[in-house]
Image (cartoon, helix red, strand yellow):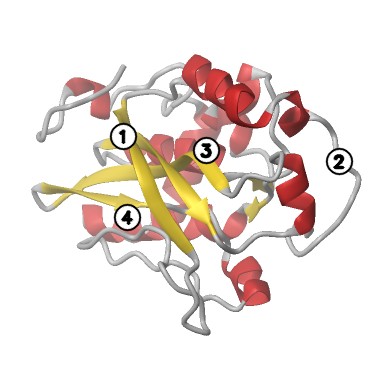
Amino acid sequence: MTVETDVPVDADLAPAWFVDSDAPNVRAFAERVTAGRETRTERAIALFDAVRDEFWYDPFCLTTDPEAYRASRIVEQDHNWCVPKAVLLTAAARAAGIPARAGFADVRNHLNTPRLRARMNGADLFVYHGYTALYLDGRWVKATPAFNAELCARFGVDPISFDGRTDALMHPYDGNGDQYMEYVRDRGLHADLPFDALMATFREYYGEGMFTADAGSDTFTR
């Protein structure tokens, strides 16, 4: 379901099939990460940092299995890509009492590898890049926990930091002042992952090769 209201609705705190914020392991993750944080903003920052850095960004682990996109499955892993990481942040935020929505946008990535470009049929447009919208201090702020700090260092860019007040999306420039990533199309905020639309769009842009196993290695490899 696409959510278009500016104020939180019941769905922003409720568990959903993918955003299963009531799962015991998701709740345990949220409780561990937010322990000692008194305010919503402090809890949101802690959750963002944990999802960003405790789960290595791996764009080669895409699958068509819907179970793999449930927060309760994601939290048991140590690597994933932007969409599952956004799903987990959304679920953990709800578990911590923070209204949250899953957001998606198409981004043009100017920092890539030959291996990833080949997997994407030569494209540099990443469709359905995942982020999370969190309701803090009376307003929605957007944050993407995609790239972990260690991976960012490999690419020579600073990791995205989140202060709970301003949007924390991708840096437009890398450490050398070269264009890094640009947002091209917004695909809205959702109460739950729009799985069918995500899969259909990936097949349209990249073909089935995006979901095949890849035994190679590059800068993204842990």
Name which residue lies at 29% across and 37% down.
100
In what element is the residue under mark 1? strand
Q: Residue furthest right?
A: 215
**Which one is closest to the eye, mark 1 or mark 3?**
3
Q: Which residue is mark 3?
A: 83
Spatial CA span between label 3 and label 2: 19 Å
Q: Which residue is mark 1?
A: 101
**Which one is closest to the eye, mark 3 or mark 2?**
2
Tell me the quadrant of the picture where the C terminus can be found: bottom right
> What amino acid is at disc 4?
Arg
Spatial CA span between label 1 and label 3: 12 Å
Q: Residue furthest bottom?
A: 176
In the rendered view, would you say 210 is above or below 141? Answer: above
In what element is the residue under mark 4? helix
Q: Which residue is mark 2?
A: 214
In the rendered view, would you say 21 is above or below 29? Answer: above
x, y percent for residue 79: 68, 48
Spatial CA span between label 4 and label 3: 21 Å
Question: Camera-side residue: 27 or 112?
Answer: 112
Question: Camera-side residue: 4 or 7?
Answer: 4
197 on left or right of 117: left
Q: Earlier in the sequence, mark 2 or mark 4?
A: 4
151 on left or right of 220: left
In what element is the residue under mark 2? loop
Q: Earlier in the sequence, mark 4 or mark 3?
A: 4
Spatial CA span between label 1 and label 4: 16 Å
Please report contact status of discs 1 and 4: CB closer than 8 Å, yes or no.
Answer: no
Please report contact status of discs 3 and 2: CB closer than 8 Å, yes or no.
Answer: no
Name which residue lies at 53% across and 24% down.
201
> What amino acid is at disc 3?
Val
x, y percent for residue 32: 48, 51
